[in-house]
Amino acid sequence: MCIIHIVEMQSINFREEKGKQIALKSDLIRVSDNFYHVKSQTTKREYNVVKTDDKWICNCPDHIFRHVCCKHIHAVEFSIKFREEVREKNKVTISPITISNCLFCKSDKLKKFGVRHNKSGNIQRLICITCNRTFSINIGFEKMRATPQAITSAMQLYFTGESLRNVQKYLLLQGVNVSHKTIYFWIRKYTKTMQEYLNKITPQVGDTWRADEVWVKVRGELKYVFALMDDETRFWIAQEVSNTKERADASGLFRKGKEVTGTKPKVLITDGLRSYEEAYQKEFWEINRQQRTLHIKHIRLQGDMNNNKMERLNGEFRDREKIVRGIKKDDSVLIGGYQMYHNYLRPHQGLDGKTPSEVAGIKIEGDNKWITLIQNAKIDRAS
């Protein structure tokens, strides 16, 4: 091997090692999927690493004049790899419930104990030989006249955009005759059950968050839904309903975001609304510049400083909200329930068909993810 080639290999390894050190020290800021600020190791400068046509470029002299993959680009690549490894390590998998143990004492000594008959069909009951307690395998749907499939189909249709009365007509074609009020009762009951369970699980979000607001009508009065979303995973972290826009206190939204994720962002992207700036000063500003969240509030319609992902979320919620022609109360099941549906059950094209929760390290398995969530929530509540 010639000396020149050896020197080139050593130089490449040196840049990779330096890039790894930068990533480990977190001396870089992720602004968006394709845009990073990377701190220089020798000066106070910051270099921009941007992805164009599936290729990273940097404005540092090493990349511009030598046309090599510089340590700043390596730092970005290592940072992405490290985040993926952390999510994989902390991944939570929610699996369908299989009845192999007693729900009460966890014994595996079970035997069949008759069948319960109702209008929706027959449900097998089991008895535990150890504790002598009986239970049915209809976990989460006990005492419900409709089948789990009918109930979860109604919820899926409702959150994808159908009105309660259209859902009622669909179920009637399936032989399930219920009122639209009953359907709303199902949605409210099971949404609350799932939310209580999912609130105990911490999503592995990124370090760039976006905030924006969208107006809604609640009992005919104009109000605003303030939403906080992770840029990388598109996980809808938190939301609040406010009576006003300009005078709203968004600090509660940011505080809730820190509680849900157990962390705070390195970058916060908002528009120029004064409410965000005041809330940022309360919740994210630090005297130590190294620990301070960068607040980007001068967004544009195009380029890297846009808020297009947040606008897409607003449009998604608007498409659903307009079907009901106005929300009836601030804590409507439509707002909180749609946040859960967006995070855990709605695949996104921008995430290669995955849900935000799946990208954030929370995977839900099973052919019917609604049933998987409801059954796990029921067992979690009973434990």
Image (spheres, helix red, strand yellow):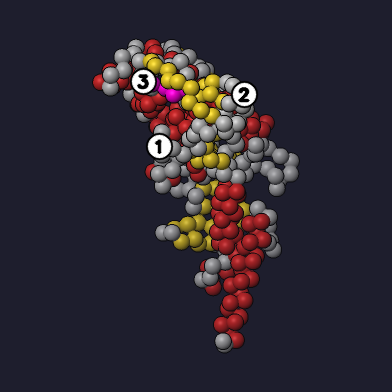
Please indicate whether residue 168 sits to the left or right of residue 314 in the image.
left
Q: Name the residue tied to disc 2.
A: 131
Residue 171 in sight here: yes
Between 190 and 210, the one nearer to me in the picture? 190
Label 1 sits on residue: 367
**Real-space CA distance between mark 2 and mark 3, rounded to the nearest whole angstrom:** 28 Å
Nearer to us in this view, 358 or 142: 142
Q: Amino acid at mark 1?
A: Asp
Residue 46: image tag: none
Residue bounds of the magenta highlight: 121-125
Disc 1, SS: loop
Element under disc 3: strand
Magenta part mainly helix, strand or loop?
Answer: strand
Image depth: mark 2 or mark 1 in front: 2
Q: Are marks 1 and 3 in contact (CB under 8 Å)?
A: no
Image quadrant of residue 133? top right
**Relative image position of residue 16 (x, y in whole percent):** 60, 67
Name the residue beneath numbered marker 3: 121
